[in-house]
Image (cartoon, rainbow, N blue to C red):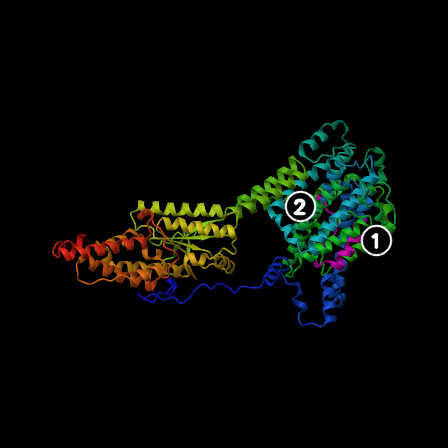
Amino acid sequence: MAASDFTSGGYESQRRVPVPPSKPFLKSLQTSLKETFFPDDPFRQLKNQSTPRKLLLGLQYFVPVLEWAPRYTLDLFKSDLVAGITIASLAVPQGISYANLASIPPIIGLYSSFVPPLIYAMLGSSRDLAVGTVAVVSLLISSMLGKVVSPTDNPNQYVQLVFTATFFAGLFQASLGILRLGFLVDFLSHATILGFMGGAATIVCLQQLKGMLGLVHFTHETDLVSVLRSVFDQIHQWRWESAVLGCCFLFFLLLTRYFSKRKAAFFWINAMAPLISVILGSLLVYLTHADKHGVPVIGHLKKGLNPLSVSDLAFGSPHLMAAIKTGIIIGIIGLAEGIAVGRTFAMFKNYHIDGNKEMIAFGMMNIAGSCTSCYLTAGPFSRTAVNSNAGSRSAVSNIVMATVVMLTLLFLTPLFHYTPLVVLSSIIISAVLGLLDYEAVIHLWKMDKFDFFICLGAYLGVVFGSIEIGLIIAITVSLLRIILSVARPRTVVLGNIPNSGIYRSMDQYPIANNVPGILILQIDAPVYFANSSYLRERISRWIYEEEDRLKSVVETSLHSVILDLSAVGSIDTSGISMLEELMKNVDRKGLQLALANPRSEVMKKLDKSKLIDKIGQGWIFLTVGEAVSAYSFILENETSFSNVNNCQSPVSQNLKTQSFFPFQQFHKQETIELLENTSMTPGRNTMSTGLNRDKGHLQRYMETYTSRGPPQTTPQDGGVSLAKRWQKVMSFKRKGEKEDKRNPLEHQGKGEGY
């Protein structure tokens, strides 16, 4: 009978931890792939559908506009019309400003607010996301590609590399979505993005000092020291006119933002402020001829819609690798920001967006954009917030915005000729100041110090190094945290909550009590090759510490170790080897190892490795409570087995040398044979009486226990197995009987001390 089947002494447990039935390899592989790449099960809607219906549903899945367009109403359009016009008033000046930040012609910024929003409206799943250019991405493009090709010396080649980088960014984004690899973007944690965006915002603001001070020559470096050196080395070239004009417009923009935050109904003031600044700045320059007095202006903007740029994709350029590298980096940043913004607003309005569909939508709009004279677009937070506050109800607001930008390209571009660059710098500064979220940083400090230092490392890397260094630091630290969490999983000691059968962490629950003689450990992570050695050493240390603690308080000695595996979702071969070594170490100490609540995958590996047979099915329990109850039952029987402690026979002495139930180390068949071959005559003398008594107790325990394999050795024996010790006792018995026949009175009165 197994340990989990005790029926005597008032304990009974019929529940065992089953080994899940094995599945064919192909079916198991299919299940694993589905769980990895299709956790949302996108094909569930195709079940029990006709073939035409499946084709329609599949098409609607990849082109969401086909799903919601038939249900679109006039009331929805009214809300989207207002929102679209509102964000267009923001998109036009921001598009021009961010193009200037990326060191490309301003007209490309307007192009980028026309085609990509139309593509996203058809393929995207967010109702609130407003597509457009992004300040941080613009700075990345300028800093990375500007080191390879000068935008002033070779403007055409530089623009070609920008289009090529945008193409590879779109290809990378779409590939992640199609291959269901969007989880890779999740490696950029919130703390990482917060620090990186904050550092980039700081650099963007410092870069705008060029426009604010009217400087012509400026450094292409993005670190704080280089930017400040470039600013203060040109003090004699500062233009007070630009500085005064820039400060006035920046104050106006910040004031409108303040009022819009104070009262949500005034959101439109903040949305219209950039366009108002452009109009006022252009009128002021035109009327005062400030452009002739040192105030730089945009100049001529070409009328017309986006020209095709397929031929400008520089696949044969010697700088192709730089374009690919830049494309992947800006693609990751664009995805991380766009999906995070989309999920945030979806959560606010209680609807769901599909991350993989968003990646496909972002990728396709950037691939299409690179072929129509656009550079990378994403979902900037500021524009999306304005879109949501303006009452957007669907992606039609992006179509309305694109229509307004199209009309601007066709008819209104000459009006931007006199727009001063200082106004664009003011618009950029006011926009990126929102990325400096100091409240979120304080929240990180309070919630998680490690996340705070990740954020700080990313910020300092960007500010004092470069955009690339900051990104590398951020990703490296994030990956390091993941590696540490896997390689150094938590192990905690569990104790019993008073007056209950519940066992919880003693650190979390100070009222929890130790179970006398039992050490209960919980492993809080899967067991892999990366952490198996650490877990073996850490569990051994727990055992040493518990033994030392028990000695110091003069309590009962340690008898057993229970491993709670409820949080171990999987285990590999290294983990199995770790458990085997741990079992041997525990055996050498004379302790018993038991497992509680191993999960399905763990039980499969234990069964395939034959470790179940070595541990014993009876030592694998459904819960920690059942494991403790089983040990308590055995300890009670040990107490009732007091005659063993009082008897001085060799077998009884052997029983007392074992710190816990000794017969667990017998091989079942070998023990049974020893019992059957042992003949004792009760009452012959005290020695034979003790042997008979020991034999009876052995039989009783054999009915209770299932053995764990071949006889083990114990440190008390000096390496001699219990079975061999029993055989030695049998030889002593036979020798004693012969002596009794020669001198029956010799041993009378000495049996108790034999």
Q: Are marks 1 and 2 in contact (CB under 8 Å)?
A: no
What residue is shown with label 2?
434
> Farthest residue in the left direction?
745
- Give x and y (percent) for residue 434: 66, 45
Span colored in magenta: 111-136
Of the pair 496 and 15, the residue shown nearer to us: 15
- What amino acid type should be assigned to the residue bearing mark 2? Gly
Q: Residue at x 73, y 62 (%)?
A: 64
Of the pair 281 and 689, the residue shown nearer to us: 689
What residue is shown with label 1?
406
Q: Could you tell which of marks 1 and 2 lies nearer the N-terminus?
A: 1
Q: Is residue 125 magenta?
A: yes
- Give x and y (percent) for residue 432: 69, 44
Q: Is residue 595 visible?
A: no
Report crowding for label 2: few under 14, some 14 to 19, many 20 or more residues within 10 A (C-alpha): few
Of the pair 58 and 681, the residue shown nearer to us: 681
